[in-house]
Amino acid sequence: MVDKEVTVHKELVEAARLVRLYEGSELSTHVIAMLDALYASYCIDLINVQPEGLVRVQSALKQVTYLRKVFANEGIDIPKI
């Protein structure tokens, strides 16, 4: 199982590296705009979220943030929470 985990991690690192190469492209700009709108939508959800849904919304916000960082080439992290 460790070999599979290492393989998948390496694939994720490489995929994120390749996505970063498109920074500033039209597609990347549109994806970032979509992620920004999604982030804003989740922030609105926080206003009325029930306690049992809080972790779900927080996790979604974190995932969107990590994905945005990859598309905007803001750091070298992978988009995994």
Image (cartoon, grey):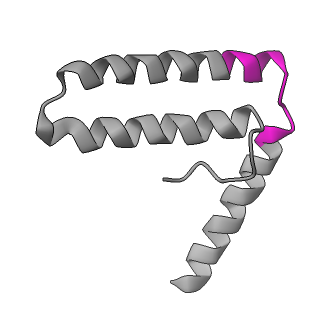
The percent position of residue 3, horizontal first and vertical second, equals: 61, 83
The percent position of residue 70, horizontal first and vertical second, equals: 70, 40
The percent position of residue 41, horizontal first and vertical second, equals: 39, 17
Residue 68, by quadrant, is: top right
| Magenta segment includes 9 | no
Label total for image: 0
Picture residue at 37% right of the left edge, 43% below the top: 59
| Magenta segment includes 22 | yes
Picture residue at 78% right of the left edge, 38% below the top: 73
Up/down of 57 relative to 1, above or below: above
Q: Relative to 15, is 1 on the left or the right?
A: left
Q: Nearest the camera: 6 or 33?
A: 33
Q: Relative to 41, is 32 on the left or the right?
A: right
Residue 69, by quadrant, is: top right
Picture residue at 74% right of the left edge, 39% below the top: 74
Up/down of 60 relative to 15, above or below: above
Residue extending furthest toward the front:
47
Give the prevailing secondary structure in the magenta stretch: helix
Residue 40, by quadrant, is: top left
Picture residue at 43% right of the left edge, 35% below the top: 61
Range covered by the magenta-colored residues: 19-31
Up/down of 54 relative to 25, above or below: below
Q: Nearest the camera: 9 or 50?
A: 50
The percent position of residue 45, horizontal first and vertical second, equals: 28, 21
